[in-house]
Amino acid sequence: MVSPLQKAVEFFKEFGLFDVVLPFLLVFSIVFAILEKTMILGVDRIKDKEYPKRALNTTVAFVVAMFVVATNKIVMAINRALPNVVLLVVIIISFLMLVGIFYKTGEFNFAEQHKTATGIFVVVILFVILLIFAGSIMKTEDQSYLSYIVDYVIENFTGTVVTSIIFLMVALAAVYYVTKGPAAPSEGK
């Protein structure tokens, strides 16, 4: 038996809420927030204060969001990727809650107390997000870019391209390790 709520979700799906309205609002909000924060399109000066050009930011965010909604492939990639990104956010919050259990009562600032771990954490999260989007963007109708890359690496693991990439990564890591300088001394110690 289908519940009224399931019927409502199906109605919204047929109406285009998930394919047009929500992706439009998401892209518009993100682009608008970035433009407002960076003030890249200029500022208005009112009483010695700088304010972003809101009308221009709104127009550009609207146009970008409309272009995204007009491209079905991008909307499909967003609809495939977002549930996985939300799952990643839930995992991160759960991790931070578990870490927070072992700290004393008070404000918990993981980034300030563990800078190296935070840097590694950020790099891993960015890599996972890249994998999520690579798995969401389709190369062909039944194959994503992630599965294409994995298949290529498996088929050509002993080939010149893959071994060259592995060698390049190891060489870059070695150069970074050798050339990084000592940590800067802290003030006041």
Image (cartoon, grey):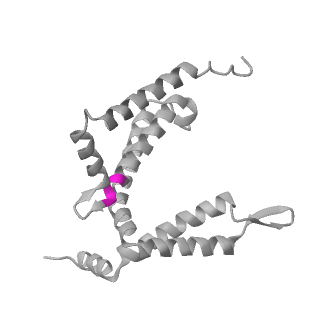
User: Residue at position x 37%, y 33% from top?
Assistant: 164
State the image coordinates of residue 56 (x, y, percent, origin top left).
67, 73
Q: Position of residue 101 (x, y in %)?
A: 42, 34
Residue range of the region highlighted in magenta in the rendering: 134-138
* Residue that appears at 27% across and 51% down: 148
Against 180, residue 87 (above or below) is: below
The quarter of the picture where the N terminus appears is bottom left
Q: Is any atom of residue 117 visible in this view?
A: yes
Q: Position of residue 127 (x, y in %)?
A: 41, 43
Q: Main secondary structure of the magenta part?
A: helix
* Residue sitting at the far right: 47
* The quarter of the displayed image where residue 91 is located: top left
Q: Is residue 54 left or right of residue 96?
A: right
The residue sitting at 26% across, 78% down in the picture is: 10
Q: Give the side of residue 34 with respect to residue 158, left or right.
A: right
**Residue 145's image quarter?**
bottom left
Does the stretch in magenta take in 132? no
Q: Is residue 44 above or below residue 120?
A: below
- Which is more toward the observer, 100 or 174? 174
